[in-house]
Amino acid sequence: MTPRLRALRRCFEGVVPASIATCSADGVPNVTKLSHVHFVDDEQVALSYQFFNKTRENVLATGRATVEVLDPETARHYHLHLQYLRTETDGPLFETMKARLAAIASHTGMSKVFRLLGSDLYRVLRIDAADADPAAEPGPDADLLATLRAFLAELSPCTELARLLDTTLLGLERHWDIRHAMALLLDSRREVLYTVASRGYRQSGVGSEIRLGDGIIGIAARERTPIRIGHAVEEYRYGQATRRYYADSGGGAELETEIPFPGLPDAGSQMAIPLLAAGRPLGVLYMESPQEQHFSYDDEDALAVLAGQLALTIELLNHAADHPDQHDGGSAAPRVQGRPILIRHFPADNSVFVDDEYLIKGVAGAILWKLLSEHETTGRVDFTTRELRLDSSLKLPEVTDNLDARLILLQRRLVERCPAIGLEKTGRGRFRLVLGGPPRLSQMPR
């Protein structure tokens, strides 16, 4: 029985190095070890191009190679007979292989030696099982499919974005034993991903940011492809990612306004799955574990399906939020009693400080300042997402931006840092400003 390429994906995890055999144009053979074999689809694999050596010289001359891989669970050997197609030096395939190679290099202490120059794409012409009596090809994982079905059923009743995200992260722990995870959404105008929900960390990190293209989270969003790493890699740890970003960009004086990213300091495994709607990135579902090789190819497949459903639901909820329920309009609230709350607003980046402590900035900061300013002027406490969307002074990104996510971010930062101010959902596309004391607003100079 000839196995399908998909059934051999365990062989490509990098646990056991593969070997590659080639011949020169005049028939001289060459065999060497290979850093990385990457599964592309049922007909193609990609090999890492790191050096211009004899192997590459032979491949360019003949267009053929044979790769031997080994299943780490069964110890069965397979020979892949390959035809060279092309070399890619950018794009999703290259970036994914670059991240995986960094994991292998870091794990073996070869980070300064391993450097991916390109991804060599090959067509698989034939697969031979080296053993005389190969086992039958494994079928679909029934438990995994049942788990995914149950997980999706739990998401279907979620009619609010906050509940959807929290249910997703809870389900990852319950069904997949993924205890550390977060959901980030994309700010397309600033090209950063911001944390909206997290689970398993001492600090929630809500509001923390990662640049598009930074680490596996940023790469997964930019390249629209899942990235999975099975070993600890210093390059992709996020504990200081935000601070490095602002220090490198000359913003060191403003570091006190940055929210620490809630990643594990010593993650053994990482996986980032982009949330895509019609091919457009909305954000990233990021998961990690202190254990190495915690995530498998099968996990990646199932969670990619989950992420697709999650992205679709986010789009539908975002659309519904811009069409609020009918309402009598929102009357002025009684005068607020209690201790005054000092609030300073810096228009340069819309950062907001409450009683001299940093709270939030950017779009969420601009929204909070608008609500408080409107309350100070008219006494209003009831608002709609639609009126925020239509307010040009907020300079919101295009319709692709998820306004409901900004409100969730703001609401959760207020709960963590300023309980005297709150946002309370009162209906679809409607919310109320809740104040525990009279706000005293101070607009700072630009």
Image: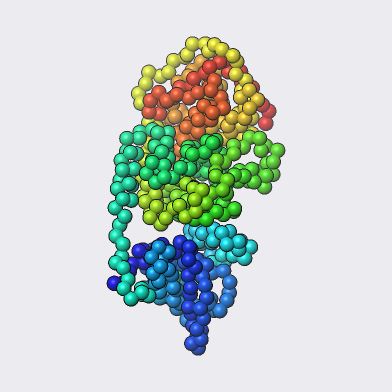
**Where, by quadrant of the figure, is residue 348 drawn?**
top right
Number of marks:
0
Q: Nearer the viewer, residue 412 or 19?
A: 19
Left or right: 143 with respect to 369?
left
Q: Is residue 372 above or below residue 141?
A: above
Left or right: 4 with respect to 247?
left
Name the residue located 48 percent from the left edge and 70 percent from the top edge: 18
Q: Nearer the viewer, residue 153 or 135?
A: 135
Q: Position of residue 265 (x, y in %)?
A: 58, 45
Name the residue located 42 percent from the left edge and 48 percent from the top edge: 276
Kindly tell me whether residue 7 is visible in this rendering.
Answer: yes
Kindly tell me whether residue 277 is visible in this rendering.
Answer: no
Name the residue located 36 percent from the left edge and 74 percent from the top edge: 131
What's the image's color scheme? Answer: rainbow
User: Which image quarter is the N terminus in?
Assistant: bottom left
Name the residue located 42 percent from the left edge and 55 percent from the top edge: 296
Q: Nearer the viewer, residue 143 or 297?
A: 143
Q: Position of residue 317 (x, y in %)?
A: 38, 36
**Where, by quadrant of the figure, is residue 41 drawn?**
bottom left
**Where, by quadrant of the figure, is residue 315 drawn?**
top left
Left or right: 438 with respect to 323?
right
Q: Position of residue 411 (x, y in %)?
A: 49, 28
Q: Position of residue 216 (x, y in %)?
A: 52, 52
User: Which image quarter is the C terminus in?
Assistant: top right
Name the residue at the bottom extreme.
26
